[in-house]
Image (spheres, rainbow, N blue to C red):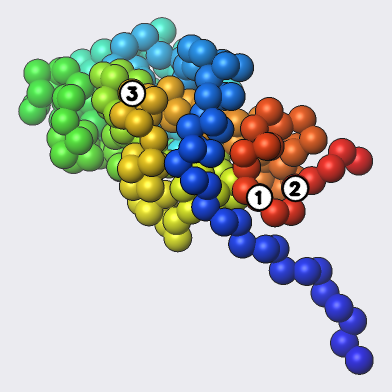
Amino acid sequence: MKAPGKPKPRKTPPMTREQVRQFLQVLANANPAPQSELDYRDPYTLLVAVALSAQATDVSVNKATAGLFAAAATPAAMVALGVDGVARHIRTIGLWQGKAKNVVALSQQLLDRHGGVVPRDRAALEALPGVGRKTANVVLNVAFGEPTMAVDTHVFRLGNRTGIAPGANERAVEDALVKRIPPALIGPAHHWLILHGRYICKARRPECWRCPVTAFCRYPDKETAA
């Protein structure tokens, strides 16, 4: 007779709009002015930092960009530094070869098409080398205050695990969050969800026993302290 395996995780039911509001209010009370953990000086350095953060931690990116931005903090300076020069600063982060090429290419495109200024336009941002929807959303949200929701692995996990915005893929979770969260809260909610997923609602074992929003979370298999 086959031994019973690990029980299949139960599906999380979606939160009601009132539960979403209460969930976010608790996070707001704990962190009323959330900010990105990436170090940047302006929209351009934010764009570069976010582009470098794919499959890398913010901590590792900040270590790399400290030297990179000291050497080149504008599109023109980055192009002058060149691919090999950028690569020397970012070898400690994942996929550094491709990222070095993209950083120089996007800097050149900013000079050629946008006068060296980061555009406040999704289509123009996504046309830059190495910039996808998530990166564009971060730049629009953080640099320009647009009500966009960047869905990384943390936000995708929270959307489904907590029930705040279940979705089969990142775009579905993004659309659900934008629909369910009041526009005025989308900006800070982007940070609240990322930070909550990074430090409490972790991938392998969510720390439900110390979670401030556990009363509103619909996750049926909450963890208890060891």
Residue 174 spot, x, y in % from top left: 37, 45
Identify the amino acid type marked 3. Ala
Q: In the rendered structure, find residue 203 and report the number of the disc placed on it.
A: none
Q: Residue 201 appears in which quarter of the rendering?
A: top right
Looking at the picture, how far across and down is residue 25, in whole percent?
Answer: 53, 24
Q: Nearer the viewer, residue 170 or 163?
A: 163
Q: Is residue 88 left or right of residue 207?
A: left
Give how far apart the Cα atoms at labels 3 and 2 are. 30 Å
Is residue 87 visible in the rendered image? The answer is: no
Name which of mark 3 and mark 2 comes first in the sequence: 3
Q: Gap in Å between the C-alphas at discs 1 and 3?
A: 26 Å
**Which quarter of the figure has residue 213?**
top right
Q: Is residue 31 visible?
A: yes
C-alpha span from label 2 to label 1: 6 Å
Q: Residue at x 82, y 74 (%)?
A: 5
- In the rendered image, which residue does mark 2 sit on? 222
Judged from the image, the secondary structure of the residue bearing numbered disc 3 is helix
Q: What SS does tag 1 mark? A: loop
Q: In the rendered image, which quarter is residue 3 located in?
A: bottom right
Percent coordinates x, y for residue 220 in the rendering: 70, 54
Query: On the image, numbered disc 1 is attached to which residue?
Result: 219
> Badge 1, how many Cα within 10 Å: few under 14, some, many 20+?
many
Q: Are marks 1 and 3 in contact (CB under 8 Å)?
A: no
168 relative position to 217: left or right: left
Q: Secondary structure at mark 2?
A: loop
Q: Residue furthest bottom?
A: 1
**Mark 1 is on which residue type?**
Tyr
Q: In the image, what residue type sits under mark 2?
A: Lys
**Callout 2 environment at 10 Å: few (<14), some (14 to 19), or many (20+)?**
some
Which residue occupies 36% across, 9% down? 41
Please name the residue that numbered disc 3 is placed on. Answer: 184
Q: Are marks 2 and 1 in contact (CB under 8 Å)?
A: yes
